[in-house]
Amino acid sequence: MINFQYARAGSVDDALRLMAGTPGAKFIAGGTNLVDLMKMDVEQPQALIDVSRLPLATVEETAGGGLRIGALLPNSDLAYHPLVEKRYPMLSSALLAGASQQLRNMASTGGNLLQRTRCAYFYDTATPCNKRQPQSGCSAIAGHNRMHAILGASEACIATHPSDLCVALAALEATVHVTGPAGERVIAMADFHRLPDATPERDTTLAANEIITAIVLPPKGFARNYSYLKIRDRLSYAFALVSVAAALEVEGNVIRDARLVLGGVAHRPWRVTAAENALRGEPADERAFARAADALLHGAKGYAHNAFKIELARRAIVRTLGQAARATPQSQSDKRIR
Ligand SMILES: Cc1cc2nc3c(=O)[nH]c(=O)nc-3n(C[C@H](O)[C@H](O)[C@H](O)COP(=O)(O)OP(=O)(O)OC[C@H]3O[C@@H](n4cnc5c(N)ncnc54)[C@H](O)[C@@H]3O)c2cc1C
Ligand code: SF4
């Protein structure tokens, strides 16, 4: 591990000032991803700017009827917040499907959005990886690619984004509030994570000198008809092979509104307008769910070890939509651990 400087920021302005004055610096919050990456020599920041004590750990109701979640709120506090459990239960469910209770106690909301891929080659500095070392090649395309993308991949990178929280945030159409040297701006979840294209080293549209201050949820929480299903190799402490966030508004047996997002299959949460349109105005039955699955998986492509994910995703989508329509959401085993 290389030597690095450390400074604790006292305010958002202080954090931005420290960042501007320290070349090669990175923000650190819970450290659950960044410290691992530093230990493995994947990230080599010259300095760490600790933002973990900034007063950004509250949940507040917005004037428009939504919720403003501070970027430093731990994942566990967010999952168990009474307003989130009541109005946005899909968010709680997605969070509790991720990591372990100890990790969720440390992991921040903002840090979760910026966690890096779990592609094994990205962590192995002895192998080529375009995300870690631009233009060096991608070891996964012809290598062990069981966990990798089936949608939106490029010739430069087939990694997936590993977050569970982000899949639910995309379905809820959350916005990411950031502050940088040029002031504040708001980024829609749909625009926050990038596809790899020719520049997989960039995961998001956030600039290196910008700090996430909050995530804002719109009023519509789909609290009745929702489900978050995560398919993984172990029931806990494992990343998604495929995950599905499904949220419906059902009247009688007719779907009035729908949100459908896949996780574990692409470089960003995967949402396609045509899939949701295939559900609106339709009876909530397996035929409509299968049509939505086809639309969401349109263009899916498997590699040597992950082609099974296409059929797995198709079945998971149909199952999750059924759970949402019946208002019988997937329960998370960690729900009982507090
Ligand atoms: C064993 C293990 C299992 C896991 N399983 C899952 C899982 O199943 N599902 C899942 O979703 N996640 C999982 N995680 C990931 C975990 O949720 C993330 O590591 C965590 O959310 C990152 O938050 P942090 O505060 O620790 O970020 P840090 O490690 O502190 O930072 C991560 C990145 O975000 C940047 N950053 C942090 N905060 C800000 C901010 N406010 N503004 C700008 N930049 C910022 C840092 O510079 C860094 O680049 C797992 C992690 C581990 C170690
Ligand atoms: S898939 Fe992406 S992260 Fe993995 S080796 Fe290829 S370039 Fe690197």
Image (cartoon, rainbow, N blue to C red):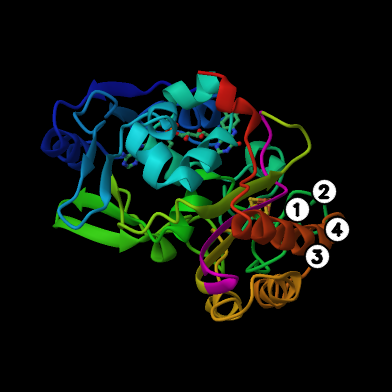
Q: Quadrant of residue 149?
A: bottom right
- The residue that label 4 is drawn on is 308
Residue at left offset 54%, top offset 53% = 226
Magenta span: chief secondary structure: strand
What is the C-alpha distance between the residues marked 4 and 1? 16 Å
Q: Is 154 or 43 nearer to us in this picture? A: 154
What is the C-alpha distance between the residues marked 1 and 2? 6 Å
Q: Is residue 254 magenta?
A: yes
Are discs 2 and 4 less than 8 Å apart at CB? no
Indicate which disc, 1 or 3, sits on the residue closer to the N terminus: 1
- The residue that label 3 is drawn on is 302
Residue 286 is situated, as x and y percent measured from the top left of the image, at 75, 70
- The residue that label 2 is drawn on is 144
Indicate which disc, 2 or 4, sits on the residue closer to the N terminus: 2
Q: Quadrant of residue 84?
A: top left
Residue 58 is situated, as x and y percent measured from the top left of the image, at 24, 33
**Residue 137 at least partly seen:** no
- The residue that label 1 is drawn on is 140
Which segment did they paint magenta?
237-255
Report the mark closest to the observer, 4 or 3. 4
Q: Is 246 or 130 nearer to us in this picture? A: 246
Residue 131 is situated, as x and y percent measured from the top left of the image, at 57, 52
Are discs 2 and 3 less than 8 Å apart at CB? no
**Residue 20 at least partly seen:** yes
Indicate which disc, 2 or 3, sits on the residue closer to the N terminus: 2
State yes or no: Cβ of the residue under disc 3 lies below 8 Å from any atom of ligand 2. no
Amino acid at pointer 2 = His
Q: Is 303 or 227 nearer to us in this picture? A: 227
User: Secondary structure beneath disc 3?
Assistant: loop
Report the mark closest to the observer, 2 or 4. 4
Q: Is residue 19 magenta?
A: no
